[in-house]
Amino acid sequence: MISGAAVSVVVCAYTMDRWGDLCAAVESLLVQSVAPLEIVVIIDHNPELLFTVETYHISMRRDKKESICEATVRVRVGDEVAHTVAEGDGPVNALDGALRAALGKLFPRLKNIHLIDYKVRILDAEPQTVSALRDLKKELADELQDGANARLEKLAGTAAKTRVLITSSDGKREWGTVGVSENIIEASLQALVDSMEYALLKK
């Protein structure tokens, strides 16, 4: 990027429920190498399309020589509830599959949505904490060892927040969403939920 370039940044959110995370996203923009000319925050949603993830659970098991990650998601849209289970190559992939399967029952057009990129950034953490979190993330992607979840929680509690950026596609277009939390799985879920809501809003 050219030094001194004028950059306008648009931050889209569909509800005010995660105000703290929205503020954290704006704060992270303010410390970039190129300061934005302006930051525009847009709250734009259609209440009829909103859904709520009531519960979710992620587990990993070993099947002979292969480790399998499984995610369970319960989603509510008005009076309708969808409860689905999906397997994936890792926690986020499984969570993405379960969420799409659940919402696909209520919003058929979401069945074509798929995750094409996933990035994680630790905000304002100590170097040793960043290294530890990266090592633990590798464990989660391959095989959940004993105590890994507890260690992740402990490390996340002593570090700054984790920012997850995902890119989704419906086969014709691509878009990106962001999740911010002290927990990498929660941040991933936030980004996935926003991605699905964005897809619902765009015709």
Image (cartoon, grey):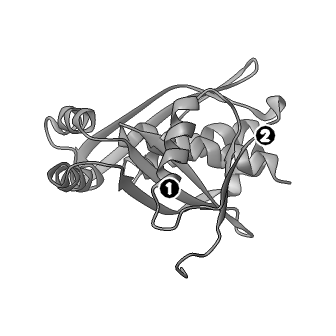
- The amino acid on which the numbered mark 2 sits, given as a three-letter code, is Asp
Left or right relative to 133: residue 187: right
The relative height of residue 54 versus residue 8 in the rendered view (above or below) is above
Residue under label 2 = 44
Amino acid residing under circle 1: Leu
Q: Is residue 159 visible?
A: yes
Position of residue 172 measured from the top left corner of the image (x, y, whole percent): 75, 70
Farthest-out residue, bottom: 2
Residue 88: horizontal and vertical position, in percent? 42, 52
Front residue of 48/15: it is 15
Q: Distance from label 1 to label 2 (Cα)? A: 20 Å
Q: CB atoms at circles 1 and 2 under 8 Å apart?
A: no
Q: Residue at coordinates 62% horizontally, 37% vertically from top-left?
A: 102
Secondary structure beneath dot 2 equals: loop
Looking at this rendering, what residue extends furthest in the front direction?
A: 4
Image quadrant holding the C terminus, namely bottom right
Label 1 sits on residue: 165
